């Protein structure tokens, strides 16, 4: 439960800081601003062009989340995108293509860290999804407490991993099952469905669909409702509900990493990821 997670966070926080020093980039990939509502931060994802999860971006994201978690002035975070093209395109395919097992191991550990940091956060997390959100990109909405999607046909959301010839890990699948149910997940995951807004709302992968220019204000007004509940009661309840799902990853992290590394290192998987990336580059608007 929380003691386990706290242990992991302490250990991994040190690794993140070491890694951040290694990148030493001048680009700010995550921007945190206080909102007009007291106690609420707006965290903007800014890894242009599509907020794909590079190792550097993940590291910066985790460090910023950790800072907010430890800053007692904040009770909630609205997570949104500052990239016009996407909320998030998920895993950066260049991180899991053509690299070595040591790199895959490091990458997967950091992605697990992000998931744990978000899923077990004591803060209220609201995803203000203002662009397409695919596969690993759904990690943020699926670990949030509430999801608001922009009503735009380009704003597709879902776990489309099977379309790339890969499978979503169990810790993506479990929150999806918790949110939309077993049968709908079975359907969505196997077919790698990306839902347009009305269908996303109907299946329940998002809680609200609003015009794009109202995503932010809606997130703030939903946040106000959540913050009306005393923190300790809400946090205990959140932990009680999420602990069994989180424990599965906390207890099986190493096996999960080994499975991922051996799966992703296969020639056939590498080939299909390379083909998908090449197709993305061809299909330019
Ligand atoms: C045993 C089992 C154990 C474990 C499981 C095993 C494996 C699990 C694997 C990990 C699980 C998670 C997987 C993922 O997240 S895979 C990524 C899936 N993402 C997608 O399918 C989205 C792809 N992107 C898009 O659809 C579009 O880019 C998008 C977001 C709709 C925006 O479209 P558009 O505005 O037209 O912009 P472009 O397509 O031109 O994109 C701009 C630019 O970005 C590059 N790019 C896009 N997405 C990615 C990406 N995910 N990784 C790397 N690069 C990406 C794109 O190629 C363009 O690049 P260019 O250089 O041409 O400008």
Image: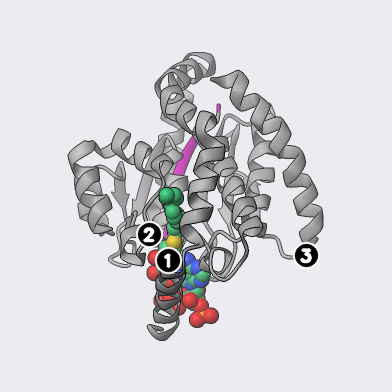
Q: Are marks 3 and 2 in contact (CB under 8 Å)?
A: no
Q: Is residue 199 visible?
A: yes
Q: Nearer the viewer, mark 3 or mark 2?
A: 2
Q: Residue at x 60, y 61 (%)?
A: 54
Label 2 residue near ligand 1, CB within 8 Å? yes
Which residue in the protein does label 1 denote? 269
Left or right: 268 with respect to 115?
left
Label 1 residue near ligand 1, CB within 8 Å? yes
Q: Is residue 124 magenta?
A: yes
Bin the neighbour count of mark 2 within 10 Å (Cα to Cα): few under 14, some 14-19, many 20 and up. some
Q: Are marks 2 and 1 in contact (CB under 8 Å)?
A: yes
Does residue 76 sit above or below 239 in this rendering? below
Which residue in the protein does label 3 denote? 26
Work out whether mark 3 precedes mark 2 in sequence or the reverse, and give the earlier one: 3
Does residue 91 sit above or below 11 in this rendering? below
Does residue 63 sit above or below 237 in this rendering? below
Residue 133, given in percent of the width and then of the height, sits at 40, 58
Q: Is residue 216 visible?
A: no
Residue 167, given in percent of the width and then of the height, sits at 36, 54
Q: CA distance from mark 2 to mark 1?
A: 7 Å
- State which region is magenta: 122-132
Q: Residue at x 41, y 84 (%)?
A: 284
Quadrant (top left/top right/bottom left/bottom right) for the C terminus: bottom left
Q: What element does badge 1 sit on?
A: helix
Q: Nearer the viewer, residue 89 or 44?
A: 89
Work out whether mark 1 precedes mark 3 in sequence or the reverse, and give the earlier one: 3
């Amino acid at each position: 439960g929380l003691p386990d997670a706290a242990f992991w966070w302490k250990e991994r926080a040190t690794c993140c800081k070491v890694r951040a020093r290694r990148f030493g980039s001048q680009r700010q990939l995550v921007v945190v601003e206080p909102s007009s509502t007291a106690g609420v931060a707006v965290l903007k994802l800014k890894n242009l062009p599509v907020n794909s999860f590079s190792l550097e971006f993940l590291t910066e994201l985790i460090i910023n989340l950790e800072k907010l978690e430890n800053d007692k002035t904040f009770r909630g975070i609205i997570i949104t995108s500052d990239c016009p093209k996407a909320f998030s395109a998920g895993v950066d395919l260049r991180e899991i293509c053509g690299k070595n097992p040591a790199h895959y191991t490091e990458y997967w550990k950091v992605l697990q860290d992000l998931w744990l940091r978000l899923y077990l956060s004591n803060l209220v997390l609201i995803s203000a999804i203002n662009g397409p959100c695919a596969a690993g990109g759904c990690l943020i909405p699926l670990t949030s407490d509430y999801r608001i999607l922009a009503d735009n046909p380009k704003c597709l959301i879902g776990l489309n991993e099977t379309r790339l010839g890969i499978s979503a890990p169990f810790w993506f699948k479990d929150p999806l099952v918790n949110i939309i149910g077993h049968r709908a997940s079975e359907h969505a995951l196997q077919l790698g469905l990306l839902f347009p807004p009305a269908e996303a709302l109907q299946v329940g992968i998002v809680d609200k669909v609003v015009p794009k220019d109202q995503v932010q204000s809606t997130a703030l007004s939903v946040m106000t409702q959540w913050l009306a509940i005393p923190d300790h009661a809400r946090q205990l309840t959140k932990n009680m509900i999420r602990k069994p799902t989180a424990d599965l990853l906390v207890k099986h992290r190493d096996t999960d990493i080994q499975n991922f590394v051996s799966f992703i290192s296969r020639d056939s998987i590498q080939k299909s990821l390379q083909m998908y990336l090449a197709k993305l580059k061809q299909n330019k608007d």
